Structure formats: structure tokens, C-alpha cells
Image (cartoon, rainbow, N blue to C red):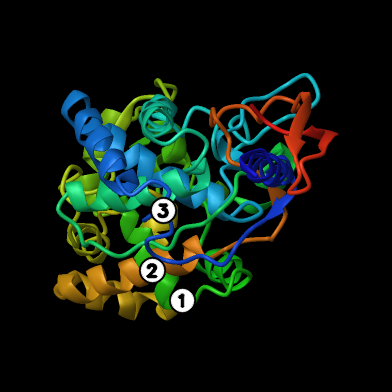
């Protein structure tokens, strides 16, 4: 009888490759990996001690993953001879970083609970923890995602916005994902922590909209500071703070926008646009409201799924290997030996 149970366990494991995303819910791993969220947070703490900026970079991965075919960790797949993934897409190349932190988290999870926690869920938990560890709000995360079997650089190029984007474009983009104007502004507050590259703002400083002049919305003394940091013809990979408190998750980002000190065009446009401006002004004086709306927006963004077949990757950078065929011998209740061939993962 024990062999019969083993057979059905193996059969279920073999079907995992073709599983479809389940309904997301809190405490999804309470029985299968009860310490999952604790493990993620501990690794994130260690990463923060090594480099404070790294956890802001990890948080950003959720945005770039979820907007492209849902929250399925497709972003984390390395390119292969047969697949151009998303890491080298226009909005990601030389911009996204800290993939090694994700590797460390996954290694710790696999050691504790092999083959249980998906990379997609890992990103959702880690993004929340990055905010909390930086002084921001805590929220309960819904889990149960599967990891994609492929990725698409083309899809990322077609979807992800540029740092040059204006508010009108961003409003339209977010609406395609059933995210409101409030969600757009609140989630843009993720730039409360971290840094941006000079490459992303040179056009604002020297040739806004092809005018040959700087963006007039930039506060003059702040523009002088940026001119020194990012001179024309300088190193585009030099980084500047996204707000005045780049290691603290707070509402300073919105205060900076009100004062014309937004780093990216896609940031400052939220204040110059009349539709988004009221939310920026409100968050600049009400941090508690910003925290609440940000947390709600992260949950809504985390719900984005296409329902494609997936798996639980052992390594977030690659899909699992083809599953070997194994001959299983078990006994029925009638004491008769039966040979059954089934494909499954060992």
C-alpha cells in the first residue's frame, strides 16, 4: 500500500510541470515551507548590510517582472541560444541589478524547502521586505505563483516605460493593467529609495523635447547640482539619488517633486500634469496616506497573472531540466506487482 501512495506522489510531481497558476492567498506556504517569509527577510537583511542600495534594486525587480506577462519571474531567466530574455531589454539593461541577492534568497529557500517556493513569490516577498527594512509600511503578501517557462525581450521592450515617459503615457499604461491614477502615483513612490543613472536624465538637462534647452520644471539650484553630476558627454553610468533621502522609504520623494527636484522626467511629470498633481501634493504632506496607498498598489500589481503553465524553478535563472523517465514498481491492494512507467522530477 505504501508503494501505491508513492506512485501517486510521483505522478502528481510529474504533473507539476504543466500546472496552472493557483488562486493567490496569504500564508500559502504555512504548511509546506512555514519559515519561507522569515528566510527571505533574513537574507535581505544581510544584503542590506553589504550594500544598502541592493534591496531597493531588488524591490524594483517586482515592477519590471509583473508588467511583462504577469508576476512569473520571467525577468530572472538568463538568455539561452533559443531565447532572448528580459534582462537585456531596453528598460532593464545596465539598469536593473542585484540579481545575486535573488540567487542568495533562492539558495536559502531551496536548502530549507527544496522545490517549494517559486521565484515569482520570492520577488513579491523580497519587494515587501525591502520597503519594510527601509522604514516603509508592512503589508500581507498573497502567494502561490508559478515560475514561467520562458521570457521575451520583445514583450518587455513593448511594455516597459522609459525614464522619458510623461504622465499621460504612464496613466494609459497603468490603466491597461487595471491600475488607477492613484496607483500610478503611489507606486512611483518606490523611487523613495535607490539611485538612477545619468544616462536617464541627460536629455532633461540639455535637450528636453529636442529644444536644445533644459527641462524648465527643474528647480535651478537642483539643475546646477545635476549638471555637475551628469555633464554633457560624461559617464552615463554615474548614479544620483532618486530623492533627498535615498536610503529611507518615506514621502520625501513627493516633497521633492513639489519643489521641482525630481530626478527622472517620469517622476517630475507627475507634478506638472494636472491629473496626477493632486495625489503628489497629498502624499507630500500625508505620509500615512502614501504608505497605505502604496501597500494597496503593490498588492494589486502582485495580482497580475496570465494563467500560463509554469513550474517551481530550482534556480531562478534557468528553467528546470527535462524530467527523466523512471520505472516504478508498486503493489496493489491485491498483492499483485505492477510495473508503471511515469515521467517525474527527482
Give the CA separation, mark 1 to mark 3.
33 Å
Q: Quadrant of residue 25?
A: bottom left
**Residue 134 appears in the rendering:** yes
What's the mark number on residue 181?
Answer: 1
Q: Which residue is mark 2?
A: 185
Q: Residue at x 36, y 50 (%)?
A: 125
Q: Which residue is mark 3?
A: 29
Residue in the foreground of this view, choosing between 53 and 308: 308
Q: Residue at x 35, y 75 (%)?
A: 277
CB within 8 Å, label 2 to label 1? yes
Residue 262 is situated, as x and y percent measured from the top left of the image, at 30, 53
Residue 247 is situated, as x and y percent measured from the top left of the image, at 17, 42
Give the CA separation, mark 2 to mark 3.
32 Å
Give the CA separation, mark 2 to mark 1.
6 Å
Is the residue marked by circle 3 packed among few (<14), some (14-19), or many (20+) residues within 10 Å? some
Q: Residue at x 74, y 38 (%)?
A: 331
Is the residue marked by circle 2 packed among few (<14), some (14-19), or many (20+) residues within 10 Å? many
Is the residue marked by circle 1 packed among few (<14), some (14-19), or many (20+) residues within 10 Å? some
Residue 80 is situated, as x and y percent measured from the top left of the image, at 72, 21
Q: Is residue 162 above or below residue 105?
A: below
Query: Helix, strand or loop at disc 1?
Result: helix
Residue 94 is situated, as x and y percent measured from the top left of the image, at 49, 27
Residue in the foreground of this view, choosing between 280 and 222: 280
Amino acid at each position: 500500500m505504501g508503494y501505491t501512495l508513492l506512485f501517486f506522489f510521483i505522478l502528481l510531481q510529474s504533473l507539476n510541470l504543466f500546472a496552472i497558476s493557483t488562486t493567490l492567498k496569504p500564508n500559502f506556504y504555512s504548511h509546506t515551507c512555514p519559515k519561507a517569509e522569515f528566510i527571505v527577510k533574513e537574507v535581505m537583511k544581510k544584503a542590506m548590510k553589504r550594500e544598502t542600495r541592493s534591496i531597493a534594486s531588488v524591490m524594483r525587480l517586482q515592477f519590471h517582472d509583473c508588467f511583462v506577462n504577469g508576476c512569473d519571474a520571467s525577468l530572472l531567466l538568463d538568455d539561452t541560444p533559443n531565447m532572448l530574455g528580459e534582462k537585456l531589454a531596453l528598460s532593464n539593461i545596465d539598469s536593473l541589478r542585484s540579481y545575486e541577492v535573488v540567487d542568495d534568497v533562492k539558495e536559502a529557500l531551496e536548502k530549507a524547502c527544496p522545490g517549494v517556493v517559486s521565484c515569482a513569490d520570492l520577488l513579491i516577498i523580497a519587494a515587501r521586505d525591502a520597503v519594510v527594512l527601509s522604514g516603509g509600511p508592512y503589508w500581507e503578501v498573497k502567494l502561490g505563483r508559478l515560475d514561467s517557462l520562458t521570457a521575451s525581450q520583445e514583450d518587455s521592450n513593448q511594455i516597459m516605460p522609459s525614464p522619458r515617459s510623461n504622465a499621460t503615457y504612464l496613466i494609459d499604461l497603468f490603466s491597461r493593467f487595471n491600475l488607477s491614477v492613484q496607483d500610478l502615483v503611489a507606486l512611483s513612490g518606490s523611487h523613495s529609495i535607490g539611485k538612477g543613472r545619468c544616462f536617464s536624465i541627460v536629455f532633461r538637462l540639455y535637450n528636453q523635447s529636442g529644444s536644445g534647452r533644459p527641462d524648465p520644471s527643474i528647480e535651478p539650484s537642483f539643475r546646477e547640482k545635476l549638471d555637475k553630476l551628469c555633464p554633457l558627454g560624461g559617464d552615463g553610468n554615474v548614479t544620483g539619488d532618486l530623492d533627498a533621502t535615498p536610503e529611507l522609504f518615506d514621502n520625501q520623494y513627493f516633497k521633492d517633486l513639489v519643489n521641482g527636484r525630481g530626478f527622472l522626467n517620469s517622476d517630475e511629470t507627475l507634478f506638472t500634469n494636472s491629473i496626477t498633481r493632486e495625489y503628489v501634493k497629498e502624499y507630500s504632506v500625508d505620509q500615512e496616506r502614501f504608505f497605505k496607498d502604496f501597500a494597496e498598489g503593490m498588492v494589486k500589481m502582485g495580482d497580475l497573472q496570465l494563467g500560463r503553465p509554469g513550474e517551481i524553478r530550482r534556480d531562478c535563472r534557468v528553467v528546470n531540466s527535462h524530467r527523466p523517465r523512471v520505472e516504478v514498481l508498486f503493489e496493489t491492494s491485491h498483492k499483485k506487482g505492477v510495473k508503471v512507467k511515469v515521467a517525474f522530477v527527482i
